Amino acid sequence: MTTYYNKFEIEAAMKVIVEDYLKDCIETEELSEDFIDLIKYNFLAKYVSFNKEEKAIEIGVEDLNATYSHYPLINIFSFPIEKSNEWLDDSFKSENCDLAFYGKLLNRKKYNYRDAEVVVV
């Protein structure tokens, strides 16, 4: 199955979906698989977790400039969940390949399609 989206459809729908992800995260104190995939994609993260005590999302990103170790150095960033989550809004990208990834997340949420091809028009 192939789905077709334009840039504006994806951007508008992602705002709604992200609000749903955050709302679910606050209510259940867990991150959904799709929300984890989105954060990993946007931040090029190695891991994502929810800190229940601080009510914050923790993101582990590899420091590519660290050359003094044989093991990857992971920097941890913590973002509190609030009504205004600019840290997440600012992470979105707008290239066609990025929009296609976001379209796949839309398909998962809207149609429950996991492997549908996405075409950005």
Image (spheres, rainbow, N blue to C red):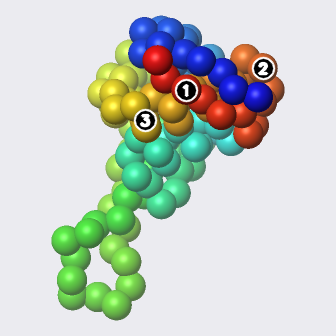
Tell me if mark 1 has few (under 14), some (14-19) or many (20+) residues whose alpha carbon lies within 10 angstroms of its own: some
Between discs 2 and 1, the one toward the N terminus: 2
State the residue position of label 2.
111
Q: Residue furthest bottom?
A: 70
Can residue 28 be seen at all in this image of the molecule?
no
Along the viewing direction, whichever of 9 and 50 lies nearer the viewer: 9
Along the viewing direction, whichever of 108 and 51 lies nearer the viewer: 108
Which residue is pictured at 19% across the width and 71% down the height?
65
Along the viewing direction, whichever of 29 and 116 lies nearer the viewer: 116
Helix, strand or loop at disc 1? strand
Q: Are marks 3 and 1 in contact (CB under 8 Å)?
A: no
The answer to which quarter of the image holds residue 115 is top right
The answer to which quarter of the image holds residue 19 is top right
Tell me if mark 2 has few (under 14), some (14-19) or many (20+) residues whose alpha carbon lies within 10 angstroms of its own: few
Image coordinates for residue 69, horizontal then vertical, percent: 29, 88
Image coordinates for residue 116, horizontal then vertical, percent: 71, 33
Which residue is pictured at 42% across the width and 15% down the height?
7
State the residue position of label 1.
119
